[in-house]
């Protein structure tokens, strides 16, 4: 198989930089399960401060952050409200039902974003025959919504409605820092709208693994119980925590470059015959596009690009997604878009 030279499949494909690897190699470590790893402790303290929360815990993945948060907020039979495009519904293997024992009520938002009226319409009555509406989940940015950013005012309005109906709020912050850079709003301001929030280190920030979940001290105390329950203890995890600390110091502001590259890609491919952008406005680092008017299916286009060392993922038969990150430069964008044009001209 041809080696991948330009990887636009996902920002999860990013490789740790040499400076990040050096920071990892020099990390002082201890048993994080016993709170003895200085690097993990510092990372959690820093992220809690960044997000404006009392405490935080380091976990192997964002999915684990989501699933533990749902399990802490909910009890069996409760109902979670989220957009139908949400990661917890589509990409976490039925975790809400399996781990939290909870149902999910899907909202029909626009590009992953919904409003107060949508929330009101989903809240159950007090009937003992109905599940209890317990938790509202928002995703910042919205992945399947096209990398869209929740406006702060809309988040605040949605949160006000949820709290008026005694709902707790959780933010899937997989690409929260992309939203911060795109909107010019601090992570703490976004996070103030919710009770719990996590920050992914292994996407745009370029770390090999890890995420940090934050909330109140009481909430994080219960998170630790779930962390042990499902095998989230990582022992001498300072090696990977060092990558996270490095990324927070050096890789946040540069996310703007990814957004610029995504817009460049969108501009170039939107001029190709048969290509239709799904989100005409590219807000962050994702470009979703429809290829149904070309002679080839999305999987066929993806396979032909792979033969040229370029990876863009197919979403079904007609849609594709390209994601920019720190391993993709402007010249790569030009080469990838030219390769796509060549395939469609064949």
Image: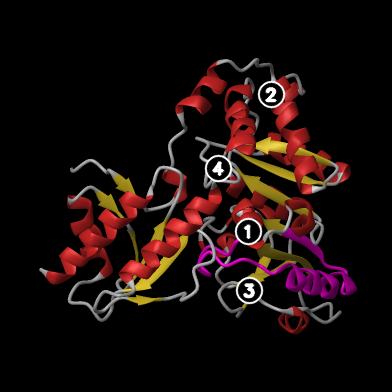
Indicate left or right for 243 with 123 as reference: left
At 74% from the left and 34% from the top, the residue drawn is 44
Q: Report the Cα–Cα distance between label 2 and label 4.
A: 17 Å
At 58% from the left and 22% from the top, the residue drawn is 239
Quarter of the figure with the C terminus: bottom left
Which structural element holds mark 4? loop
Closer to the camera in the image, 49 or 292: 49
Q: Which mark is residue 113?
A: 3
At 18% from the left and 43% from the top, the residue drawn is 2
Q: Residues within 10 Å of mark 2 (few under 14, many from 20)?
A: many
- In the depicted structure, whether residue 251 falls above or below residue 128: above
Closer to the camera in the image, 81 or 190: 190
Which residue does the numbered mark 2 point to in the structure image? 39
Magenta-tinted stretch = 141-170
Q: Which mark is residue 205?
A: 4
Which residue does the numbered mark 1 point to in the structure image? 179
Which structural element holds mark 3? loop
């Amino acid at each position: 198989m041809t080696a991948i030279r330009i990887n636009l499949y996902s920002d999860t494909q990013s490789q740790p930089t040499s400076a990040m690897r050096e920071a990892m190699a020099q990390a002082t470590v201890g048993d994080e399960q016993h709170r003895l790893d200085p690097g993990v402790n510092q990372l959690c303290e820093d992220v809690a401060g960044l997000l404006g929360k009392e405490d935080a815990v380091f976990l192997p993945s964002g999915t684990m952050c989501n699933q533990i948060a749902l399990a802490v907020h909910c009890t069996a039979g409760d109902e979670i409200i989220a957009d139908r495009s949400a990661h917890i519904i589509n990409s976490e293997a039925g975790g809400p039902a399996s781990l939290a024992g909870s149902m999910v009520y899907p909202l029909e938002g626009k590009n992953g974003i919904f409003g107060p009226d949508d929330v009101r319409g989903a809240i159950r009555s007090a009937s003992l025959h109905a599940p209890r509406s317990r938790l509202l989940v928002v995703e910042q940015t919205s992945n399947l919504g096209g990398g869209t950013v929740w406006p702060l005012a809309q988040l605040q309005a949605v949160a006000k409605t949820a709290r008026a109906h005694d709902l707790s709020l959780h933010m899937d912050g997989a690409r929260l820092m992309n939203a911060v850079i795109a909107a010019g709003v601090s992570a703490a301001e976004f996070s103030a709208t919710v009770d719990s929030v996590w920050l992914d280190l292994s996407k745009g920030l370029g770390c090999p693994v890890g995420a940090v979940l934050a909330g109140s001290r009481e909430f994080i105390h219960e998170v630790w119980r779930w962390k042990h329950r499902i095998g989230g203890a990582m022992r001498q995890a300072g090696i990977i925590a060092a990558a996270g600390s490095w990324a927070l110091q050096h890789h946040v502001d540069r996310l703007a470059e990814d957004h610029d590259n995504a817009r460049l890609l969108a501009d170039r491919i939107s001029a190709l015959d048969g290509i239709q952008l799904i989100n005409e406005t590219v807000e962050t680092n994702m470009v979703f596009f429809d290829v149904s008017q070309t002679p080839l299916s999305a999987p066929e286009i993806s396979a032909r690009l792979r033969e040229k060392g370029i990876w863009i993922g197919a979403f079904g038969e007609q849609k594709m997604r390209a994601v920019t990150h720190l391993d993709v430069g402007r010249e790569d964008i030009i080469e990838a878009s030219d390769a796509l044009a060549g395939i469609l001209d064949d």
